[in-house]
Image (tube, rainbow, N blue to C red):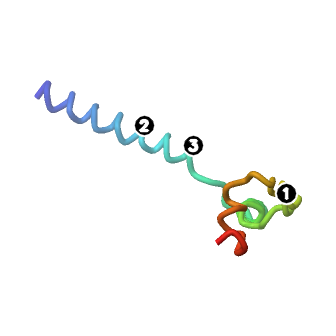
Amino acid sequence: MNSLIFLVALVLLSVLGGLLLWLRERGPRSMEAHIREFERQREALSPGPLPPPRRRRPPEAGDPDLRAKDPRTG
């Protein structure tokens, strides 16, 4: 009988703790909360401003890639 009371108390404490965690972690249910959530997700998916174009360095005369691409050198 003593172990049955302990088991029932343990189950009740577990259910109560789970209920408290659920109440604490559940999201708001108002329309404004849904609108804010939608705007937050939309902002996360929207593209940001484009980065400025990168300037390329002109190839140097001794660059091996330049020599390999020059049709005159074969």
Is 38 situated above or below 12?
Answer: below
How many residues crowd around disc 2 within 10 Å: few (fewer than 14), some, or many (20 or more)?
Answer: few
N-terminal label among 1 and 3: 3
* Residue 56, x across and y down, in percent: 83, 58
Element class at badge 3 = helix
Q: Residue 58 bears which disc, if any?
A: 1
Q: In the shown orientation, is residue 41 left or right of residue 24?
A: right
Residue with the mark numbered 3: 24
Q: Which residue is mark 2?
A: 17
Q: CA gap, disc 2 to disc 1?
A: 67 Å
Residue at screen point 71% across, 66% down = 45
Between 56 and 3, the one lying in front of the other is 56
User: Of the residues shown, which amino acid type is indicated by label 2?
Assistant: Gly
Marks 3 and 1: in contact by CB < 8 Å? no
Which residue shows up at 80% across the image and 57% down it? 59
Q: Position of residue 37 (x, y in %)?
A: 72, 61
Image point (10%, 28%), residue name? 1
| Residue type beneath disc 1 | Pro
Q: Residue furthest left?
A: 1
**Front-most of residues 60 and 14:** 60
Residue 8 versus residue 42 in the image, above or below: above
Type of residue at label 3?
A: Arg
Which of the two marks, 1 or 3, is nearer to us in this view?
Answer: 1
Name the secondary structure under disc 1.
loop
